[in-house]
Amino acid sequence: MIKENKKILVLVNSDWFFLMHIFPIINSLKRDGLDIYILTSNTGKKQEIIDHGFYFEDLKIDRKGVNIFLELKTILNIYKVYKKVQPNIVHQITIKPIIYGSVVSRFLNIKTINTVCGLGYSFVSPLNNLNNYIALLGYRFALKYKKSFHFFENKNDRDFFVKRKIIIPNIKNQVINGVGANLEKYFVSQIEESNDQKIVIALASRMLWEKGVKEFVEASKLLYRKYNGKIEFRLYGKIDNGNPGAVPQEYLESIEIKSYIKWFGFENDMFSVFEKSDIIVLPSFYGEGCPMVLMEACAMGLPIITTDSVGCRECIDDGVNGFMIPIKSVDKLVEALEKVILDKNLRTKMGLASRDKAEKDFDQEQIIKEYSKVFNRMLK
């Protein structure tokens, strides 16, 4: 058991990302009597984080910024907080926190745990892109720090770094399915569908082009004449203005067709979204980790349609719990949707297979145990 009064500091790029993607892992550590500090940018969630029992340290960090002076200022701010808090371990999540935090950790001789939550926007474009080159140099520095341990959310990302000799395989790193899904919170609430209900097809994600928003909308248009009145398309998610791939609000408002397709904005109650949905779609070609929306949809017993893309393919057994399609292929998306729309028994069968997969691969309690093992080992 971890002794009391030890300190964990979590560095992540935004407060909402912490709450959505890493909160269950860090919250579980409170059971071990740790003092936990969250160093992140405050976008309005500061008080919520404090109410959960964490210390909050504010950080100005621009996720898409390249101004060298502002970036150096960010590193200096990280240094000041690390120096003030003097944590036993820092847990760094996403690209800039991992790279910048590792610079400071090395200087101050602090143990680190890094979570690579996918390669993200920077690696969607070709690998000779300057941003990619700079990010790879940063990762090369960060992930070779001897007092660090690295979690990857899919095997492809880990292999990506091994191939480029940024990390050594099987030493001080582990592949784990993101934060998993809470199998008690997300459960199969209803298998039977009433015959007079519309089939609801949902995409729940940040509104980024790379998440397949345009492909989802285009597929809905192609199915309109044939299925209007029988199906409904819904988009749930915030506009991520800090991301270069953000979908403009004007576009999302312009696509609405009454009782057929609509953007609902951010929805905090994802259980309600899944409960109202019959099919979950994520046509992503973003550098995903292991998409939470797909893991939670599986836990809810829903068929999923996603792409043969990094991170997404971890969530799909093609033809078993849904369909895997090529990236950016509207035609294949339409084809997969029609198969599921037209066969109620297939939807039920695939939904049950999704739940089986969630129990086998995405159990959040098991993932928390794996994180806890690493924290315990490093704290001892």
Image (spheres, rainbow, N blue to C red):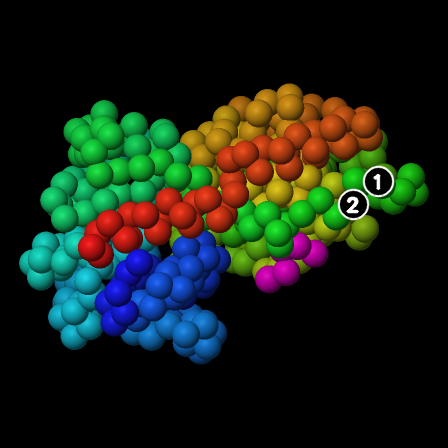
Report if residue 269 lies within the magenta region: yes
Amino acid carrying mark 1 in the image:
Glu
| Picture residue at 74% right of the left edge, 41% below the top | 278
* Residue 248 in view in this figure: yes
Residue that label 2 marks: 190
Q: Is residue 204 left or right of residue 327?
A: right
Find residue 148 and name its label.
Answer: none
Q: Which of 109 and 122 is in front in this view?
A: 109
> Marks 1 and 2: CB-CB under 8 Å?
yes
Residue that label 1 marks: 192
Q: Residues within 10 Å of mark 1 (few under 14, many from 20)?
A: few
Secondary structure type for disc 1:
loop
Q: How far apart are marks 1 and 2 (CA)?
A: 6 Å
In the rendering, at what x and y percent does residue 266 appear? 59, 60
Give above or below for 283 relative to 11: above
| Picture residue at 70% right of the left edge, 29% below the top | 350
- Give the magenta-colored segment's residue range: 268-272
Amino acid carrying mark 2 in the image:
Gln
